[in-house]
Amino acid sequence: MKKLKSPIISVSGVRGEVGVSLDMQTITRFALAFGTLVSGGTVVLGIDSRTSSPMLRHAVLAGLIATGCQVMDVGLCPTPTVLLTAKVLNAQGSITITASHNPVEWNGIEFASASGQLLTQRERDELLDIYDTENFVLMPWDKLGAHQVYTESTTLHLEEILNSSWLNIALIRNAKLKVALDCGNGAGCVMSPTLLKELGCEVIEVNCIPDGNFNRPAEPNPDAITELVETVVNTGADIGFAHDGDADRVVIVTDKGVALNGEWTFACVTDFIISKTKGDIVATVSTSRMIDDIAIKHDVKLHRTKVGVGYIVEKMHEVNAVIGGEGTGGVIYPGINHTTDGITSIAAILQYLVESEITVSALVEAMPKYEMCRKKMEIPSQAIASQLLAQYKDEITSTNSDTVSLELTDGIKRVWDDRWVNIRKSGTEPVIRIFSEAPTASEAEMLCNQTVERLEMLMKQIKR
């Protein structure tokens, strides 16, 4: 990955490589801006397991206390747990120190506002304006904020999951499932093993020490979780689960040792939840057509948004959706929290499995099938990425045929009757993402490769 001189600021928060594009001055400025945004209210603060997180925590504390905030420090916690705590405590906001699925040398901060909800576009704009202008509201010595340790967050989250209306704990316990779990040495270590044991599962732990060293890449792609695959096969586990760095995502390994991408997590959970509660579904423009088929199967409406949890949540509120998510393995359960929650997904998938009374492999076999191809194209800067997409859009618009639909909800999406390709600028990495889907793997890869080749040609025309 190319080294950027500035952090990436997006709907996902602020991320960068520590000591390169992310420094303590930037973190403290953002904390000052956020403390000003929430008028010095109560803010829940949590961290993931990265070795740089304690350092960033001190920088954030300085900014929050300087603006009069009462900080409830939950320590090492998954991102969804931090936001749930803010909701339960009626806090004015929360900050999670995490870079989620980014490489171990990266870190960042994610913001949420009242009741554990991600910032709206208006709030994001206001936060950036305060940050840019440095129009901070600083408190005098006798009105500074305070710091308090709060230790009940994981208990709160576990209780919310175990009390879910769709969960039958006794049924799962009676199934006596053997589950392999790979937390990637991340924040999921402090909760997911406990959840599985509460559900009566025999747990085989892989990378479940939260030391932040990340024995595998933080993003749990199929090629990154080979150790989990081997564990499932060698132990005869019924299923395997793998988290990203902050456990807002989870992916599945089947009983036959097949690592599934995150599309399957969202598809399985959606099929299960919609069978219990009819209602609208929200997905991103780059999520698999499996979700379309599930919506048709249950006769419910599907809404598509830009990529980013914040956009999904805003649409879910607008249409009162019962489930939302994206193909990364992130699913949003509005009854629990308005952010992606890989820990709750473990419980939902196990319930789906035991109710179906078949293996994970059989569940996958019964689902509609499409093949996806995902590629990244590294870019020198976000500005050049925007310029490249603009050139590609101009070219496609002028040459597009009547048989191809063009959608511009997020980046550029070309849609044929039986396939599609989406090109968009990442909000979390210095890359352009190219996603394609087609009836066969070879067709999806060919479509992806053709698009990458064209983007590379256009890239050569851009002066840097």
Image (cartoon, rainbow, N blue to C red):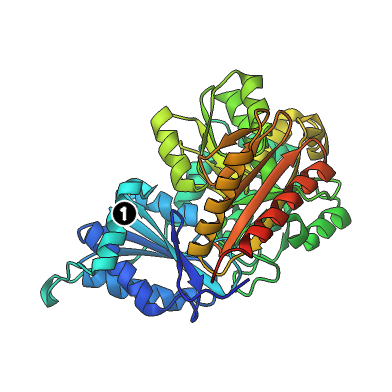
Q: Amino acid at mark 1?
A: Asp
Residue 33: tell me if it is visible.
yes
Direction from residue 237 to residue 395 in the image, left or right? left
The residue that disc 1 covers is 125
Direction from residue 175 to residue 295 in the image, left or right? left
Give the residue at x 72% y 56%. Answer: 453
Give the residue at x 56% y 57%. Answer: 388
Question: How far across and how far down the image is residue 380, in percent?
Answer: 56, 70
Quadrant of the rendered structure where residue 110 is? bottom left
Relative to 342, say whether 406 is above or below.
above
Quadrant of the rendered structure where residue 43 is? bottom left
Question: How far across and how far down the image is residue 191, in percent?
Answer: 56, 56
Furthest residue to the top? 299
Element type at marker 1?
Answer: helix
Work out whether residue 101 or residue 131 is closer to the camera in this orientation and state it. Answer: 131
Question: How far across and how far down the image is residue 212, in percent?
Answer: 59, 73
Number of on-image labels: 1
Give the residue at x 50% y 48%. Answer: 308
- Identify the image quadrant of the N terminus: bottom right
Relative to 409, say whether 13 is above or below.
below
Direction from residue 132 to residue 365 in the image, left or right? right
Work out whether residue 31 or residue 68 is closer to the camera in this orientation and state it. Answer: 31
Question: How far across and how far down the image is residue 384, in percent?
Answer: 52, 63
- Identify the image quadrant of the C terminus: bottom right
**Label 1, residues with CA under 10 Å away: few <14, some 14-19, many ≥20:** few
Work out whether residue 82 or residue 322 is closer to the camera in this orientation and state it. Answer: 322
Work out whether residue 448 or residue 26 is closer to the camera in this orientation and state it. Answer: 448
Residue 183: tell me if it is visible.
no
